[in-house]
Amino acid sequence: MIPTRKLGHSGIEVSSLAFGAMMFGKWGNTDVAECHRMVARAIDAGVTLFDTADMYDEGTSETILGAALHGQRERVVLATKVGNPMGGDRARSGLSRRWIMQACDDSLRRLQVDYIDLYQMHRPDPATSIDESLEAFDELVKAGKVRAIGTSTFTAAQLDEVHARATALGVARPTSEQPPYSALARGIETDVLPACRRHDIGAIVWAPLNGGWLTGKYQAAADGASQGANDAQSRALRQPDHFDHGQAAIRAEKQRLVAALIAIADGAGLSLKQLALAFVLDDPTITAAIVGPRTFAQLDDLLAIAPLELPAGVRDAIDAVVTPGRNVNPSDAG
């Protein structure tokens, strides 16, 4: 079974691997029956943390996940997010009290639940006072609609501000931060992870496989001319603003670095994916790593990877390949 960890100061216990449902719907997998099988498989393997967001395929991800969790509600910790535009509509976005209240009720309806375990600010909202946002989240906690609150892709300075204002206002403090983190995107080690430690919050990291780079699927050619990169369903092609699409120099460097990481993994008796996931979970500040498989086969492959622990000396070897605190592609900072 997958080990569990405490989620910051909330006391909530979650699996160290989290299931990210961003691929449910037209962003990845429109086969609802397969999505349901994936959720059941993950629960059977010991995954308890399921993460989604209202804006993933305009609510479709939440709808599919909610139906898949029917009858399983008490076995899981359910996390979703608010703030990014729904369908690109700026009127349905942000962290104003008006939108937080409406969006929460909409998410509860789509998820078919009475409460959300972890409700997260998807991105900072410079147009809204953080006091207004925090007071709205606190209302939801007091109403029993939300158990704990969190942030996603906030800077260390923003985390400090959020926690200072929550303390001053006497309202619920965030218990988690959700940043990008992998062996190729280590920027959060410099200041975000220390901020998490300062405020006793857990980090739930996304893109631990760096958009597929740390599965090895882009190793055939630096320009991405591998089977994985040419797959019409490839996340890198469907979301060209992410994961180095069209950036030949960065892709070439990542190919070289991944080759070095593969050599380290081979020497330690690990697969590249094992190495990548064990690396992010090696820091006790990391509560969980989100994996976002598109298909049942991809999920099954990830769940078969165990144990997720780095052998002695392996972290030092990784540090020699990718300097601590470095994002190989600055865009990977999210």
Image (spheres, rainbow, N blue to C red):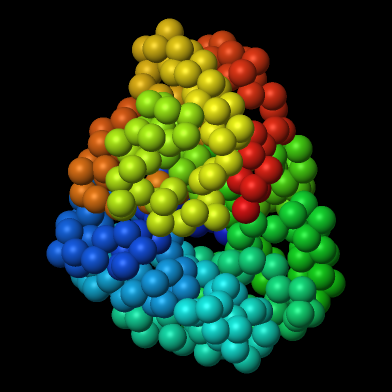
Q: Looking at the picture, how far across and down is residue 106, in whole percent?
A: 44, 86
Question: Going by the image, does 246 lie left or right of 111?
Answer: right
143 left or right of 48 in image: right
Classify 281 as above or below 233: above
Between 200 and 331, which is closer to the camera in this rendering?
A: 331
- Residue drawn at x 45%, y 25% is 275
Residue at 48%, 29% in the rendered image: 222
Return the x and y of residue 203 as percentages of the image width and height. Answer: 59, 48
Q: Quadrant of residue 254?
A: top right
233 and 85: which is toward the camera: 233
**Is residue 117 visible in the rendered structure shown here?**
no
In the depicted structure, whether residue 139 falls above or below residue 206? below
Residue 287, x across and y down, in percent = 53, 45
Out of 321 and 109, give the one closest to the viewer.
Answer: 321
**In the drawing, does residue 62 fall left or right of residue 172?**
left
- Which residue is rendered at x = 28% and y = 71% of the image? 64
Quadrant where the N terminus is found in the figure:
top left
Whether residue 191 is visible, yes or no, is yes
